[in-house]
Image (cartoon, rainbow, N blue to C red):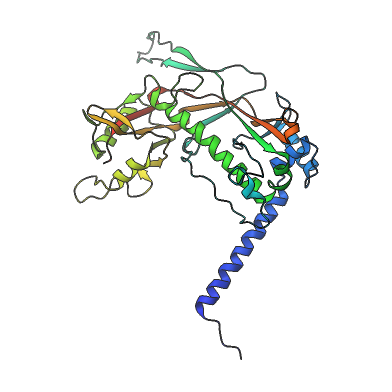
């Protein structure tokens, strides 16, 4: 009778089998979903796996594009030069055997969509988003049995949200397209592109300057509520976050996808700060005052206040569904140019994302820009 395997060996075999199961599931997903690069290869005449089928599925799902390109869903884009010959620019992806889950560069977390921002698909051919708003509520009055109420007509204005374009180019060698961008590497590159695109859109929503072609973000929007921590900034406290909550509540704007956002430095400080002596920490989990709390490095930590220069952080609280993101295309559009650099064996892919950013009501947000974390 065979002796039982040692416990450590059984656990090792079980973990190995689980890994094999994960790899098999990944392979099934890969076969079920045609790659973006299959479609790109179709456009330059390359014969890759299921490329014709991929192009047909993408076209059917996304419809015609304004520039004659290939459209992929809103969250997929690539943004760098890739070739086989240079390892850091794609060569690492064409080795004979490689890991199936390539490590992506670290980026700030994308949080605004997760917090409830409102994405508005715009009809083809539409101009700016025009959002009507009631600025003065109707004023009902109490009257007697046959009394006449006083006039209480509401007032209106409109929010106009123009298109802003996020664009960049990618140059891929034809050899890399044929050899190195299949399977998991293609999926990894598309996933990384998704993170890059959403990270930049997130940064613009949170802290866009409003200058040049960049949208105005929450922290720079005129008219949002503001709470000051101190003359030279101050550490976060229960008083501070309660004042911020009240600033929105006093405007009757605390109804919707309410939540907090800041950077990791403020998060760490809150986790180490007691609400009151012996009462527990302000942020023991993922909620602050009962509302969701998220962090991203897209929220600055180098602001100035008084004598505190370059060390202040921002903290935002508000109704995230009042962030409007109109989308003028069905997704990210890739316009493929296989001709200009054909003698070098290169294919140019230009990426377009046409969106807008606006706050439906500025009263729905409050920001504190002088939080100290040291």
The reply to whether residue 117 is in sight is no
For the question of whether residue 166 can be seen, the reply is: yes
Residue located farthest toward the bottom when viewing the structure as drawn:
1
| Residue drawn where x is 57% and y is 39% of the image | 194
The quarter of the picture where the C terminus appears is: top left
Furthest residue in direction left, as rendered: 277
Of residues 173 and 9, the one drawn nearer to the viewer in this rendering: 173
Whether 125 is drawn above or below 365: the answer is above
Is residue 252 found left or right of 58 in the rendered image?
Answer: left
> Is the residue 102 above or below the residue 321 in the image?
below
Q: Nearer the viewer, residue 374 or 234?
A: 374
Q: Of 182 and 332, which appears nearest the observer?
A: 182
Q: Answer with the quarter of the image where residue 292 lies.
A: top left
Q: Residue at x 46, y 32 (%)?
A: 203
How many numbered marks does the figure carry? 0
- Residue 286 lies, in percent from the top left, at 38, 46
Q: Left or right: where does residue 220 sit relative to residue 12?
A: left
Q: Is residue 352 left or right of residue 316?
A: right
Quadrant for residue 265, please give it.
top left
Tell me which residue sits at (71%, 35%) in the image. 346
- Residue 230 in the image: x percent, y percent? 22, 30
Q: Is residue 320 above or below residue 84?
A: above
Tell me: residue 197, above or below residue 10.
above
Q: Position of residue 225 (x, y in %)?
A: 33, 24
Measuring from the top left, give residue 88's x and y in whole percent. 58, 45
Name the image quarter holding the N terminus.
bottom right
- What residue lies at 50% left-to-right and 33% top-to-bottom? 200
């Amino acid at each position: 009778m065979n002796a039982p395997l040692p416990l450590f060996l059984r656990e090792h075999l079980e973990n190995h089998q689980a890994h094999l199961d994960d790899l098999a599931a990944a392979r099934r997903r890969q076969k079920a979903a045609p790659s973006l690069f299959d479609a790109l290869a179709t456009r330059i005449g390359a014969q890759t796996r299921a490329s014709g089928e991929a192009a047909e599925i993408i076209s059917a799902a996304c419809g015609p594009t304004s520039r004659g390109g290939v459209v992929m869903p809103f969250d997929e884009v690539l943004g760098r030069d890739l070739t086989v010959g240079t390892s850091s620019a794609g060569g690492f992806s064409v080795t004979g055997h490689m890991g199936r889950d390539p490590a992506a560069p670290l980026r700030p977390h994308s949080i605004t969509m997760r917090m409830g921002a409102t994405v508005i698909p715009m009809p083809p051919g539409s101009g700016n988003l025009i959002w009507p708003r009631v600025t003065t509520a109707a004023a009902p009055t109490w009257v007697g049995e046959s009394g006449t109420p006083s006039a209480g007509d509401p007032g209106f204005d409109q929010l106009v949200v123009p298109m802003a374009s996020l664009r960049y180019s990618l140059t891929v060698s034809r050899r890399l397209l044929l050899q190195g961008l299949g399977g998991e590497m293609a999926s990894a590159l598309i996933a990384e592109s998704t993170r890059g695109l959403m990270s930049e859109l997130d940064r613009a929503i949170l802290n866009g300057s409003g200058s040049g072609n960049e949208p105005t973000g929450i922290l720079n929007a005129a008219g949002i509520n503001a709470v000051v921590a101190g003359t030279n900034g101050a550490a976060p406290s229960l008083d501070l976050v309660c004042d911020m909550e009240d600033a929105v509540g006093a405007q009757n704007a605390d109804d919707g996808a309410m939540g907090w956002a800041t950077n990791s430095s403020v998060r760490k400080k809150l986790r180490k700060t007691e609400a009151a002596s012996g009462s527990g920490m302000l942020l023991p989990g993922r909620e602050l005052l009962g509302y969701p709390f998220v962090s991203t490095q897209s929220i600055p930590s180098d602001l100035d206040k008084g004598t505190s220069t370059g060390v202040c952080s921002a903290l935002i609280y508000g109704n995230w569904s009042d962030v409007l993101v109109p989308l003028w295309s069905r997704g990210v559009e890739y316009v493929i140019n296989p001709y200009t650099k054909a003698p070098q064996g290169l294919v140019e892919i230009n990426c377009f994302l046409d969106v807008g950013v606006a706050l439906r009501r500025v009263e729905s947000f409050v920001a504190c820009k002088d939080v100290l974390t040291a």
